[in-house]
Image (cartoon, helix red, strand yellow):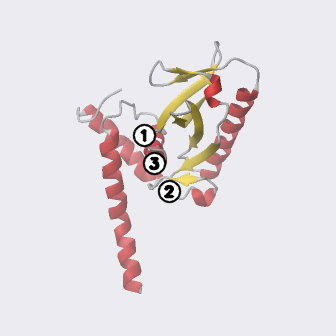
Amino acid sequence: MKMLFVLLLSLAPLQAFCAWAEDFEALKSVPRSYEAAGTICEEIARLNVQKKFPAPQYNVMTGISYGNAERVIGELDVIVFDTNLNKVIQIAEVKCWKDLNDGLDKAHEQRARFLKNLRSSKDLIFRSTSSAETFAKEQFQYVKEFITIGQLGAVQAGYDLELPYTLKELKGYSYEMIRCQHNGQCVRP
């Protein structure tokens, strides 16, 4: 029994490596800057959410800001559109923070701010942070789920989902993506 436990423990790094190899291949063609600390987490979270919400019925995006004509009020990390309904059905706030509790508090704060603004009578402008694409406020009115995602260990801290990587691994993967873009092997933004 002890031998089986040791064997399983030794396989964990191999599983993480295989998962990263798959994620790395998927991210090579995504034109996104990985300079910001949270970008790698958002993109890996998007890949994980896409497994639950596959195309063509769903379109899973990262980075939609909302605000008014004067300023941006907030940004949504991972957004799931039901393409048949042309409506958002899930929003995920992604927080890969050293202090998981602080990250969860921030995610809840961002959710409350978003819902407050969405329920107000104010006009809101929704825009992709990576393209000029805009969205109507009505597309966000019937969000069924608002979840939180963090690094490995986040579920134990109260998050809804967690990525299969530690914070240290995610930082390393971010540098790997930057290096890949610099070498011309990955698409640049």
Q: Which corner quadrant of the image does residue 122 belong to?
A: top right
Residue annotated with mark 3: 48
Q: Is residue 150 left or right of residue 175?
A: right
In the picture shown, does residue 80 fall above or below 98? above
At 48% from the left and 34% from the top, the residue drawn is: 61
**Quadrant of the drawing holding the C terminus:** top left
Q: Nearer the viewer, mark 2 or mark 1?
A: 1
Q: What's under tag 3, amino acid-wise?
A: Asn
Name the secondary structure under disc 3: helix
> How many numbered circles are shown?
3
User: Is residue 76 or residue 141 the one in the foreground?
Assistant: 141
Furthest residue toward front: 84
Badge 3: residue crowd in 10 Å (few <14, some 14–19, many ≥20): some
Q: What's under tag 2, amino acid-wise?
A: Leu
Q: What's under tag 1, amino acid-wise?
A: Ala
At 38% from the left and 74% from the top, the residue drawn is: 8
**Contact between labelled residues 3 and 2, with CB atoms less than 8 Å apart:** no
